[in-house]
Amino acid sequence: MKKQWKVLLGFILVLLIVIFALSNSQEVPVNFLIKKIYLSLVLVIIGSALIGALVVLLTSGATLFQQRKEIKQLKETIKGYETNNEQKLEEEKAAYQREKENEIAVLKANYESLLKDKDQALAAMENGQPDKKNNPPIDYYD
């Protein structure tokens, strides 16, 4: 919608320039530093408007080009940060998983050790050699 208003305003301005130029049709001298020539005022007004439009187009085009280049660089920077963050996240996940696996391994080793001690105490009791001072009573609900 905004662009439509700009186009409509541009057409109105061009129409005003054309009407103004056509209402001034006499010849006027134009000095080009070296030579002086006589042109219709219509041509001078329209030529001046075209040169002004060209200057605006070139200056805004250069700014637009520079902004597009900067946007492209910023998008690449953002993409790099996203990739870097994903990589760090994967590394942190892997480190956390390794840590938890190590904890599980330690707990399993402790459990196996306790189970082995209890089995030895049970075997000793079955053989009739209860050793009450070194081994507490067997409790399988530990």
Image (tube, rainbow, N blue to C red):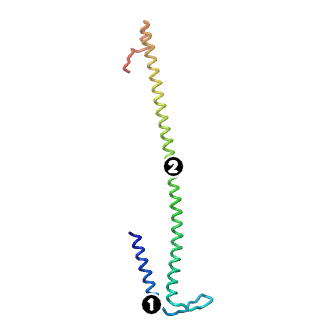
Q: Residues within 10 Å of mark 1 (few under 14, many from 20)?
A: few
Q: Residues within 10 Å of mark 2 (few under 14, many from 20)?
A: few
What residue is drawn where x is 41% and y is 70%? Answer: 3
**For the residues carrying marks 1 and 2, which lies nearer the camera in this image?**
1
What residue is drawn where x is 51% and y is 75%? Answer: 56
Q: CA distance from mark 1 to mark 2?
A: 64 Å
Counting from the top left corner in percent of width and height, residue 87 is at 51, 45
Q: Is residue 18 above or below residue 108?
A: below
Counting from the top left corner in percent of width and height, residue 53 is at 50, 78
Q: Which residue is mark 2?
A: 83
SS class, disc 2:
helix
- Total labels: the figure holds 2
Counting from the top left corner in percent of width and height, residue 8 is at 40, 76
Residue located farthest toward the left when viewing the structure as drawn: 141
Looking at the picture, tell me which residue is in the foreground, 94 or 135: 94
Looking at the picture, tell me which residue is in the foreground, 125 or 29: 29
Residue located farthest toward the right when viewing the structure as drawn: 34
Whichever of labels 1 and 2 marks the residue nearer the N terminus, that label is 1
Q: Is residue 60 above or below residue 113?
A: below
Quadrant of res 142: top left
Looking at the picture, tell me which residue is in the foreground, 81 or 69: 69
Q: Is residue 46 above or below residue 103?
A: below
Q: Which residue is mark 1?
A: 23
- The kind of residue on which mark 2 rests is Thr
- The kind of residue on which mark 1 rests is Ser
